[in-house]
Image (tube, rainbow, N blue to C red):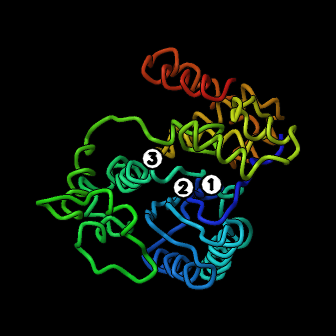
Amino acid sequence: MARPLRIEFPGAYYHVTSRGNERKDIFHDDHDRKQFIFYLKSANLRYKAVIHIYCLMSNHYHFLMETPKGNLSQIMRHINGAYTTYFNIRHRRAGHLFQGRYKAILVDADAYAGELSRYIHLNPVRAGMVDIPEKYGWSSYAYYIDKKKKPDWLTLDFILRYFDGKGKSPQKRYKVFVSEKINCNYESPLQKTTASTILGSDNFINTVREKYIKGINDNNIDRNLPAIRELKTTSDINELCEAIDSLIDADPALSRNVSLYLCHKYSGRALKEIGNYFGIKESAVSQSSIRFSHKLDKDKKLKKRVDYILKKLDL
């Protein structure tokens, strides 16, 4: 299957995430996190990237970014490339740090920026790292609620303008908005993504297609932006895992188990290739898949979740 189509144009907004290779940590300590934030700052200064939201987890990161110059690929080469070089030198290692390419979802900002910002800021809470988001020091949340002085490279106004009103300040209104979903099971806004590529209304998708995709080879559109059409079954391990990651966020262990199981069952790839991707032996691929299958037989809630993923991926 061809790689997902990158839709780039001036003024585009993206939810961007990238995970560690083999689900390993990409940050070993606060020094690493500070260095990664330095590259966010330099992306803002050198490439005019507008960072609205960020959250650094243990083995992945999220941010909501705007690209006034329509240069997402250039920005991400800088951030991931520079950080990988730094990380490998500091930790005396070689090879890939991130799992495949970064994942970027084009976002209808007016419709989803607020909800997406809440979802990103609550990642540490859902992962059990803190009980409230302001206790987590490696996201932009503290700046949004006036607990820290905003750095020049971070932009708050776009999202806070949605919380203007009489009485409470936008910062206090935003805090209430985010707090409403603490300890609540609610649907990730990313589950509304079309073809793992666009998060937006039908009008937004149609506009993007007419203005920025029209003229691209129809075969590429059908494969990469199905509905735009429907996401088709993929035999590419990395792309299948990326799609699963977008549906299971903030739970790396579950994402890995589901990904391994579905790759074994549906990818059609050799056990050795699957094992190499996940960093395990061929025999462990089959054993893990069998164990997970038995778990599905016993856990109805888990089976329902996996069935939902199968339906979304049209497997």
Q: Which mark is residue 15?
A: 2
**Front disc: 3 or 2:** 3
Of residue 157 and residue 91, the one placed in the foreground of this image is 157
Residue highlighted by disc 1: 104
Q: Is residue 256 visible?
A: no
* Residue depicted at 38% across the width and 66% down the height: 139
Q: CA distance from mark 1 to mark 3?
A: 17 Å
Q: Quadrant of the N terminus?
A: top right
Q: CA distance from mark 2 to mark 1?
A: 6 Å
Above or below, comparing residue 197 to residue 93 in the picture: above
Above or below, comparing residue 106 to residue 193 in the picture: below
Of residue 87 and residue 110, the one placed in the foreground of this image is 110
Q: Is residue 219 visible?
A: yes
Residue highlighted by disc 3: 111
Helix, strand or loop at disc 2?
Answer: strand
* Residue depicted at 26% across the width and 45% down the height: 182
Describe residue 73's horizontal placement relative to residue 175 as left or right. Answer: right
Of residue 291 and residue 59, the one placed in the foreground of this image is 59
First in sequence, mark 1 or 3: give its number: 1
Which amino acid type corresponds to the residue marked 3 in the rendered image?
Ala
* Residue depicted at 54% across the width and 24% down the height: 308
First in sequence, mark 3 or 2: give its number: 2
Above or below, comparing residue 148 to residue 172 in the picture: below
Marks 1 and 2: in contact by CB < 8 Å? Answer: yes
Which residue in the rendered view is the most extreme toward the left? 167
* Residue depicted at 40% across the width and 35% down the height: 187
Residue 131: percent from the left, percent from the top? 24, 53
